[in-house]
Amino acid sequence: MSELFSSINIGSLHLKNRLVVSPMCQYSAKDGFANNWHLVHLGQFATGGAAAIIQEATAIVPEGRISYGDLGIWDDQHIEKLREITTFIKENDAVPGIQLAHAGRKASSNKPWLGRGQFAPTDPLGWQTVAPSALTFHSGDYVPQELKIDEIEDLIEQFGRAAKRAIQAGYQIIELHAAHGYLIHQFLSPLSNIRTDKFGGSFENRIRFLLEIIRRVKLEITTQSLWVRISATDWAPDGWDLDQSIALSRFLTEEGVEIIDVSSGGAVSHQKIDLGPAYQLPFARAIKEKTGSKTATVGLIKTAAQASDIIAQEQADLIMIARSFLDDPHLPLHFAKELSVDVPWPKQYERAK
């Protein structure tokens, strides 16, 4: 049998195979509330055979949304619909996860199909952005407010409260979004963090925000699995890089993080990414080899053979896929057929097997 369809235990969590739906923003919420679009969007991956499904970047505070259409979990009222989603996912033999996030200086933006431009703080659809330092992502963006120490401490607390709500809503995986140039990554990268206090400067200071968030979130966790998504490199000179990611991963594993979800880029607009099939796999492989941490890999993994080889060669522990799942929500079922692996289909769909 292909190793891609072997099960894996991650702490107290059991995944039936190694295929996980990567978080994908839908820009379809109102005031942070999930709706039937999110139920059907996420639910279809459960019926399609994914082992786990990580919900899109879900904002811990209103100002943490990338756009006004992002999901949120800053209010107890958000829980009811999210619980409906997690219930359906579990009923269909998959594990529900959520990515807790704050967009920082990349917040207050339009939906991608409407141009992605950043709204002014005074615009009805926008708000004042915040960041570790008063530096913009694009030259034409509105300058973010530099966070004060007490504001940073409050955001750490908000991550904890969001985790508590996520657990109440039924999520079994809590992933912290420390990648793609959003707030936590902004603290990590010396290209976006030029602070001179305890949250800036040295490597130890730049990782402090993330470590304190982890410690706060862990106060809420019982049986849930804690994951962190990182950008292994900024793809830019003098930025965050693989060596720092390896060092950070050692700290994360010591703190109880069970999966390092390894992506890359997003910190600066002048990044130069070397795209190609599985172009981010070397980062996940290096972190796994150097630290012994369990890793997930992402990025242009499109074929069953490609995904299966990665697991068989122990280059990563999980395969995270996004766009190919949008194209084919039943991707695991079709990968299994390609690899001559017999996996259960939903009874309602067996006539198509």
Image (cartoon, grey):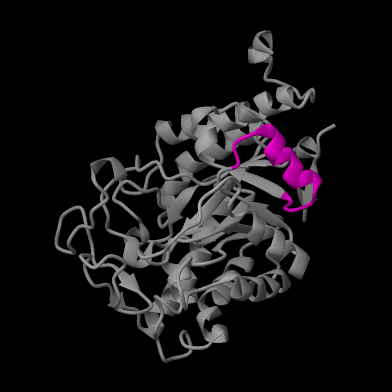
Which residue shows up at 70% across the image and 20% down it?
Answer: 345
Q: Nearer the viewer, residue 22 or 173?
A: 22
Q: Quadrant of residue 254?
A: bottom right
19 displayed left or right of 232: right
Q: Nearer the viewer, residue 257 or 331?
A: 331
Q: Tell which residue pokes out farthest to the right in this image.
A: 1
Which residue shows up at 34% across the image and 55% down it?
Answer: 66
Residue 261 against residue 192 in the figure, above or below:
above
Q: Quadrant of residue 103?
A: bottom left
Q: Nearer the viewer, residue 267 or 46?
A: 267
Which residue shows up at 48% across the image and 71% down it?
Answer: 157
Q: Is residue 134 visible?
A: yes
Question: Where's residue 61, x and y in %?
Answer: 38, 61
Q: Nearer the viewer, residue 235 or 21?
A: 235
196 displayed left or right of 146: right
Question: Where's residue 324, x and y in %?
Answer: 54, 34
Residue 308 is inside the magenta segment: yes
Query: How many discs appear?
Result: 0
264 displayed left or right of 18: left
Specify the segment rendered in magenta: 301-317
